[in-house]
Amino acid sequence: MKRSKVIIKKLLIIFAVFIILFSAWMAWGNFTVGLNKITVKSSDLPEGFDGYRIAQVSDLHNATFGKNNSMLIKLLEKSEPDIIVITGDIIDSRRTDVEVSASFAESAAKIAPCYYVTGNHEARVKDDYLILEKRMKDCGITVLRDESVFLEKNGDKIRLIGVDDPSFTKLETGRRARTIDDKLGEISQGEGYKILLSHRPEIFSVYVKHDIDLVFSGHAHGGQFRIPFIGGVAAPNQGWFPQYDAGLYHKNDTDMIVSRGIGNSYIPVRVNNRPEIIIASLEKGE
């Protein structure tokens, strides 16, 4: 009997330690943000952009990490990017707070030139989004709504293209991909290295079709719950075990970076899926 009680006591202690460690790991994975450094190489990259650093922020969803998002701002400052790209869902349609989103954007704009495209959540709160868009434009952020600009560095130029999320036009799922296809057919023409900001990674084939060199995307939230060696469990518009959930993908001459994002929406908890800011370094080479 005594031996049984000792065994049970030990098992309870082990279980309690496991719960404590698991809780600490979950807290770390949900309430801290990491820097994910990715190198993208291309022989088509102009010499002047060799070593160019792009910070990507995606899917903020009104999340706050520190007072006035000080944790995010410090990470961006530390990374010393040439530009910052914000790839949609900076706001959340279920708990909309324009001030949180606008305040973050205004602070980010003081670090480096910022470029922004919409996500599906902005389309759901169009009136609030218009207020946010004005705040962003007023602080110098370039809002790309189916348009492009040229970036210059050391005498060379590359093209930065941004497309509105197709949710701004009520369409069936299949038609959304065709809409982006039509838009890129109009605004991606021309030679030279091209970077695309588009919220949705599930239409990677469309980006490849239009010979985009590098795409920055989000939307998938890393699959929300990540299984080691397998990846994300589920993502919007991709369903179970999504093909494009996080990281760098390559097809033909097109690279796509999919951010795990920072905030959450319908599911408030992440598992094995730490929020991230991506730092992409461009290198000339094969």
Image: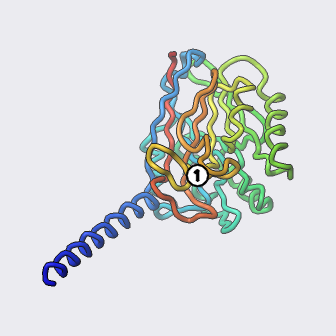
- Residue at the limit of the structure toward the left, as seen here: 2
Identify the secondary structure beneath mark 1: helix
**Viewer-proximal residue among 210 and 11:** 11
Question: Badge 1 is on which residue?
Answer: 221
Q: How many numbered discs?
A: 1
Quadrant location of residue 15? bottom left
Quadrant location of residue 61? bottom right
**Viewer-proximal residue among 180 and 205:** 205
Residue 229 seen from this side = yes
* 76 in relation to 32, above or below: above
* 244 in relation to 74, above or below: above
Pinpoint residue 118: horizontal percent, then vertical percent: 72, 48
**Viewer-proximal residue among 40 and 21:** 21
| Amino acid tagged 1 | His
* 192 in relation to 245, above or below: above
Q: Residue at x 72, y 44 (%)?
A: 143
User: On the picture, is 234 further left or further right than 138?
Assistant: left
**Viewer-proximal residue among 98 and 155:** 98
Pinpoint residue 196: horizontal percent, then vertical percent: 68, 33
